[in-house]
Image (cartoon, rainbow, N blue to C red):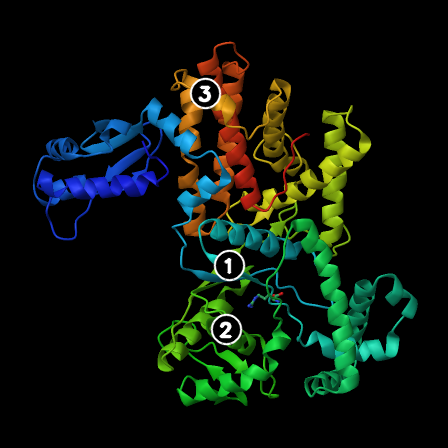
Amino acid sequence: MDLSFDLVTALDRMLAGAAPHAGLVEPGFTPEVRPADPVHGDFQANGVLAYAKRHRQNPRALADTLVRQLGELTPLFDIAIAGPGFINFKLKPATLLAWLKAHATRDALAAGAAAAEHGHTVVVDYSSPNTAKQMHVGHLRSAVIGEAICRLLEFSGAKVIRDNHVGDWGTQFGKLLWAYKRHLDPAALARDPLEEFERLYKTGNHAAEADPAVLKEAQQELVKLQAHDPENLALWKKINDTSLAAFQQIYDQLGIRFDAMLGESFYNDRVDQIYRELMACGLAGESQGALVVFHPEHPRFKTQPFIIRKSDGAANYATNDLATILYRAEHFHATDALYVVDKRQSDHFDQLFLTAGKWFEKTDRALPRLEHLDFGTVLGENGKPLQTRSGENIRLKDLLAEAVERSYRLVSEKNPELPDSDRRAIAQIVGVGSVQYADLSQNRSSDYVFAWDKMISLDGNTAAYLLYAVARIHSIFRKLGLPPGDAAPEAGAIPFETPAELALARKLTHFPDALDLAVQQLRPHFLCTYLYELAGEFSTFYNADKVALEDAPVRARRLILCNRTRLLLETGLQLLGLRLLTKM
Ligand code: ARG
């Protein structure tokens, strides 16, 4: 029995084939299968009820006729008609076993998923911090969510291009350069260059606020930079290179490798084409010296301008983003471009996508699917955006260091006999993983409260809980003297019988549904919820049913359950961007 297919698709096909034989012939009608609440069945057929209603037939009788016409897959399921005419499919114990045997490796899981995004080239724009500043807690979400989305899409068969759209050409450079030339502290620069840049920027900013003459000088520094003055350009490059090196340390901790780092400056000499084309196709017009786009059909954007060239003649964020879309379409042949950016920028992206849509249509280009994957704010326990006690932004590197330190304490409490170097290494993975997972396990569009005690804990929906569940399965195999990936001890298994076995096996077969939901909606928290429930189901099973038995066929089937739980937890955690442990 070949079960390496996607069960939903297979059932859909079977239902579509049976429908005409059962007399369900309305044009365009096909019954449809969706994953169901597992109490009632694993899958449920939809649409028959509505069909019966439209044709004034008895829905239960119609469902009954349809079920009698079902073909090849019926032996795999217990099929029941429930309520007014729902058709429920429940995998039989032998089918559960066959599914688990067919999904023994990460590759087998990926093969099932790979159809979903096949043929897509997806540019994911994420992290994208501004240079000359440290990354702070506000930069956490884009990096963490973006990376998880890249991994989920790749697993589902897409070609993914990770593009860090660094803000390296902002107006901050005018004030920074002004201060750099007057107030640089060379010793501080040598100690911690990013810290010194930040201090200089603040100095420049204060001075410009206090004195209009300084503001003018700072603006002139920016104009000189934009005109490629060699001195300013060299300083600018030094500041950017230093920033990127510091960002890289964070990316290394989070396991992120970008394919491209095309910052805003990359698009400098590509903006003239934008002005020309948008004017030529009648989208952009002058307004108070600036070049702007209005959208007459939109309630707000008919009067709220999308500024694409400022009145001083400079390009801005919007211009760069328009040039970026063109580049991604032409150079990367992107079918999709996703922007993992704070939801407070939603107006910008709405205007950007509307403008790009009209521009591409008028110039006969194929527009990639553009989507803003928004996320909410990280809040402190007081419900306000997370900050230090003194009201400063919390630096990401300090936050990660604290997470590792707290995890070290947790690990040391749990397992004091482990050598210190092991506990340190484990704490690194648990600490960073806890921060990632706390972020990913929430619906990304909501704000969430950053609470150390909840996040670094062995109880609840946390990284530590899941990593520990994986480590526990590894220790089961270590005690039995078996390598966990080995198929030999699984031979001779007979179908599941106990309630705990059946519940766990059933939960395991729902992995593709959870993955599919996370990928379709580009929301990793669906996968988190599933992994948490799976780990809970495993615990129940392991407490109820002994694995190390004499009875070989029963032991074999229980080893399959252990091993697949390990595989799915590990695969899922990796897709979220976490690193794994075999001991904890
Ligand atoms: N640098 C911007 C910021 O810090 C985010 C850039 C997001 N990406 C984009 N293509 N606009 O707010």
Q: Amino acid at mark 1?
A: Val
Q: In terms of depth relative to the viewer, which is nearer, 268 or 556?
A: 556
Question: SS at mark 1?
Answer: strand
Name the residue: 81% across, 32% down.
420
Question: SS at mark 2?
Answer: loop
Q: Which residue is mark 3?
A: 557
Q: Quadrant of ligand 1?
A: bottom right
Q: Which residue is mark 2?
A: 331
Residue 300 lies, with reference to residue 281, above or below; the image says above
Question: SS at mark 3?
Answer: helix
Q: For disc 1, does the CB lie below 8 Å from ligand 1?
A: no
Instruction: Identify the image quadrant of the N terminus.
Output: top left
Q: Quadrant of residue 350?
A: bottom left
Confirm or deny contact between disc 1 and disc 2 (CB under 8 A).
no
Q: For disc 3, does the CB lie below 8 Å from ligand 1?
A: no
Q: Amino acid at mark 3?
A: Arg
Name the residue: 34% across, 27% down.
95
Residue 378 image offset from top left, x and y in percent: 61, 51
Label of residue 160 in the image: 1
Q: CA distance from mark 3 to mark 2?
A: 51 Å
Instruction: Say left or right for 56 vs 96.
Output: left
Residue 578 image offset from top left, x and y in percent: 61, 43
Q: CA distance from mark 1 to mark 2?
A: 14 Å
Sooner in the amino-acid sequence: mark 3 or mark 2:
2
Sooner in the amino-acid sequence: mark 1 or mark 2:
1
Extreme residue toward the right, this view: 187
Residue 8 visible to an observer of this rendering: yes
Residue 323 lies, with reference to residue 344, above or below; the image says below
Q: Amino acid at mark 2?
A: His
Residue 61 image offset from top left, x and y in percent: 10, 31
